[in-house]
Amino acid sequence: MFLIIFGTRGVTRNAEKGEFHCPCCGSGSAYSLKRVRRFFTLYFVPLVPLDKICEFIECQGCQGTYQTQILDHDPAQQQKEFEAEFHRAARRVLVLMMLADGEIDPEERKVLGEVLAGLTGKPVSQDQIDTEIRLAQHEQLALDEYLATVTPSLNETGKEMVMRAALCIAAADGRLEPEEASLLEEIREALQMRPAHFRGILAEMALKS
């Protein structure tokens, strides 16, 4: 009796090679795109390609494997996007902080310009500050509502920097109004910052003043 043995099995082959940013090895790492395809086999020999099962990336340095989306990972671009989001959040928070007591104090405007310049590394004109004030007044978005949209994009360092900047504005005129204290608490809650963390920042800044 003649026995025919057939079936299917997955076969992994190299589809392409290149360089990518490996989370383990860093940028400039060599990779191989692996493609797993199901084959019809006869006597355990793959003969006819059938459907594609999956694709994955294998780092040639550490042999780590990743989904193909890893090829789109650009740490430098992600850092730029984070910084842009952080600067946008910081500008709006600082302006809303300045407007909390219903007055625009000249000293607060000065400190606002200095803080923004420190954050962006570029000088900030009074015209730019006026533009930020007009945008905040026009949108009339509550601070907690605004922060709810940007907090998920901020890491712990970004949240702390936003809080420190807000504290600088609150203390710019030498006194902390009840409205400002209330707004600082709103910022803390919206940033999902623990009370102990906030008190630590407050104590540290008080020591430096």
Image: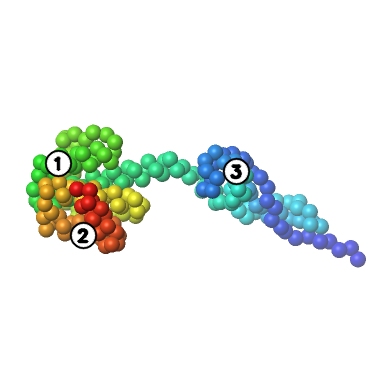
- Colour pattern: rainbow
Seen in the picture, residue 19 relative to 49 is either above or below; the reply is: above
Q: Which mark is residue 31?
A: 3
Where is residue 67? Give x, y as percent. Answer: 55, 51
Q: Nearer the viewer, mark 2 or mark 3?
A: 2
Alpha carbon of mark 2 to alpha carbon of mark 1: how far? 22 Å
Is residue 124 something that shows in the picture? Answer: yes
Q: Secondary structure at mark 1?
A: helix
Q: Secondary structure at mark 2?
A: helix
Residue tagged 1: 109
Question: Three-letter amino acid code at disc 1?
Answer: Arg
Residue tagged 2: 185
When asked about the image quadrant of residue 3, the answer is: bottom right
Q: Is residue 82 left or right of residue 59?
A: left
Q: Earlier in the sequence, mark 2 or mark 3?
A: 3
Q: Residues within 10 Å of mark 2 (few under 14, many from 20)?
A: some
Where is residue 44? Give x, y as percent. Answer: 79, 57
Front-lying residue, 13 or 201: 201
Alpha carbon of mark 3 to alpha carbon of mark 1: how far? 52 Å
Question: Three-letter amino acid code at disc 3?
Answer: Tyr
What residue sits 68% from the left and 47% below the top? 13
Q: Is residue 106 left or right of residue 167?
A: left
